[in-house]
Image (cartoon, helix red, strand yellow):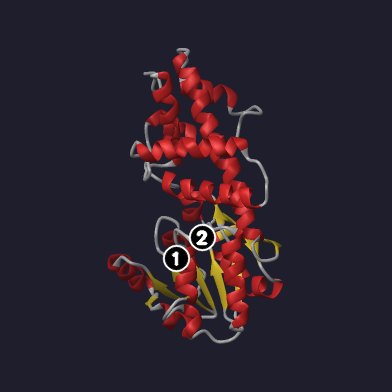
Amino acid sequence: MRVGFVGLGIMGNPMCKHILKAGFELDVFALEENVIAEFVALGAKKATYAEMGAECDVVMVMVPTGAISKSIMFGENGVATTAKPGTVLVDLSSVTAAESQECYKLAQEKGLKFLDAPVSGGEPKAIDGTLAIMVGGDQDAFDIAKPVFDAFGSSALLVGPSGSGSITKLTNQIIVNNNIAIIGEAFTFAAKAGADPVKVYEAIRGGLAGSCCLDAKLPMMAARNFKPGGTIKVNHKDITNVLKTAHSIDCPVPYTAQLYEILQSLKVHGHLMDDQASMVTYFEALADVTVEEKK
């Protein structure tokens, strides 16, 4: 099977390395020539979108927005202009269900298959090859793409029809981002009260307050390490998509609406390219305290 992959950023780069390690032939495209050169040296082939359409059985896209995904797949000189019937187009990006469903319809019109398949786990799980992949679309398309999913993920589940993967990812983002925000608030409280945040973390992580988010982000907060594994920019976009979708279906999401304003404040204060762990700085500014390990 030959796989095309567009987008070799924080997530796409390690995902593609796992695809190569699994033995798939791989066409790649990215905006950075040095990144493409790295993959060519590993055995991949540089290809345009149209070349991927003509050559590949599965083409995967991992880019910032649904508009970019649609352009790559269905725009002028896009993948769909040359793809043979039955080719599977996979959008790994975090987008709205409406955007995914639009791409699904466009693919059907051209005799192609489409899956919305966003991932969860951030850079660490992309590097480990243990991402969770939540998929929307048809069973036959999923069956074709599943071996590729297995190359970079520990679980790939077909949730339901087109758009279901995108809804699942937005649900995930509500939980993850609110969780990280409340961790920031809680440990700002602990620090302001004079406790050592790291000791508090060690005391509570084995109880009901424990979570993957707590284990991943509190140590980063305490170490003042905001090097991005998942940026505020990406999560700001995802939460914006949550609110758009929630408003369209008349589903109130009051906690997430407040979270959006927190992310908006972080954007204004220059944290857009920082890790999600930098949410703590919003609460630190309110309380005039810093969450860090006591020496």
Q: Which mark is residue 93?
A: 2
The residue type indicated by label 1 comes to: Ile
Q: Is residue 213 visible?
A: no
Q: Left or right: 267 with respect to 2?
A: left
Q: Quadrant of the C terminus?
A: top left
Judge whether 92 appears above or below 128 on screen. Answer: below
Query: Residue 281 occupies which quadrant of the picture?
Result: top left
Residue 162: x and y, percent? 66, 66
Query: How many angstroms separate mark 1 from mark 2 (CA)?
Result: 10 Å
Please tell me which residue is depicted at 57% across the width and 58% down the height of the picture: 96
Q: Is residue 105 visible?
A: yes
Residue 98: x and y, percent? 60, 62
User: Considering the numbered disc 2 on the image, is that residue within a helix, a strand or a loop?
Assistant: loop
Please tell me which residue is depicted at 43% across the width and 19% down the height of the picture: 287
Residue 149: x and y, percent? 58, 65
What residue does disc 1 label? 68
User: Considering the numbered disc 1 on the image, is that residue within a helix, a strand or a loop?
Assistant: helix
Please tell me which residue is depicted at 43% across the width and 82% down the height of the picture: 50
Q: Left or right: 39 with respect to 164?
A: left
Please tell me which residue is depicted at 53% across the width and 57% down the height of the picture: 94
